[in-house]
């Protein structure tokens, strides 16, 4: 009987050594998704969104978790107020009807201990498509100023705006859009 109790106690101790899922809140001051596209082949235009929210749940021991990001489309920032309004119009983001873009993960993919990509669903203008965000950098550590654990990553995906009913002027204004999400999140 003592052996059984010792075995159960040892198993319980070793299970507690595994990390539990941790929740991180997206830091809106350091998370500004950006998008880029070809403008008539002349140049690559780069714009961003200034308001983003969401949560990241991460279980590093189990190599699992979830990502839930909401981008406020009314916060689009092209650098020019008139063009911001143009991008917010019906032909592009239609922010009156669709004030957010969302990404909800269904699988985190690791390469060793590093997050390599995130599979999930991207919703733009009410249209949801499966995408894979490639993670080009990933790091978790104590934030030097906040003295709390934080994680950061850069994730990117190429999409076709015509697939999200935002294809005016395509193909002259590039149909392919690169969406990059530099994200920082602070542990709850």
Image (cartoon, helix red, strand yellow):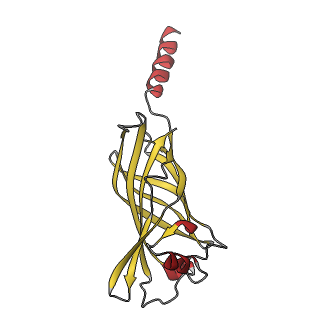
Residue 18 location, x and y as percent? 44, 31
Quarter of the rendering containing residue 125? bottom right
Residue 124 location, x and y as percent? 57, 71
Q: Is residue 97 above or below residue 142?
A: below
49, 174: nearer the viewer: 49
Quarter of the rendering containing residue 73? bottom right
Residue for point 47% across, 13% down: 6
Quarter of the rendering containing residue 183? bottom left
Q: Residue furthest right?
A: 97
Residue 162 location, x and y as percent? 52, 83
Q: Is residue 107 above or below residue 122?
A: above
Residue for point 40% across, 60% down: 155
Q: Residue furthest top?
A: 2
Count all numbered tags in the image, as a single digit: 0
Left or right of 67? Residue 143 is left
Residue 88 location, x and y as percent? 57, 76
Q: Residue furthest front?
A: 81
Residue for point 48% across, 49% down: 27
């Amino acid at each position: 009987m003592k052996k059984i109790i010792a075995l159960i106690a040892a198993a319980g101790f070793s299970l507690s050594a595994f990390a539990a899922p941790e929740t991180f809140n997206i830091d809106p001051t350091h998370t500004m998704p950006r998008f880029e596209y070809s403008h008539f082949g002349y140049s690559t235009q780069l714009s961003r969104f200034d308001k983003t929210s969401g949560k990241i749940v991460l279980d590093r021991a189990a190599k699992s978790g979830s990502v839930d990001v909401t981008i406020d489309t009314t916060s689009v920032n092209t650098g020019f107020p008139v063009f911001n309004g143009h991008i917010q119009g019906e032909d592009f983001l239609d922010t009156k009807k669709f004030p957010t873009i969302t990404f909800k993960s269904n699988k985190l993919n690791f390469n060793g201990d590093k997050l390599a990509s995130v599979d999930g669903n991207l919703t733009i203008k009410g249209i949801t498509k499966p995408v894979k965000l490639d993670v080009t950098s990933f790091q978790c550590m104590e934030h030097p100023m906040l003295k709390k654990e934080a994680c950061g990553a850069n994730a990117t995906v190429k999409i076709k705006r015509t697939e999200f009913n935002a294809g005016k002027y395509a193909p002259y204004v590039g149909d392919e859009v690169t969406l990059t999400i530099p994200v920082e999140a602070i542990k709850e």
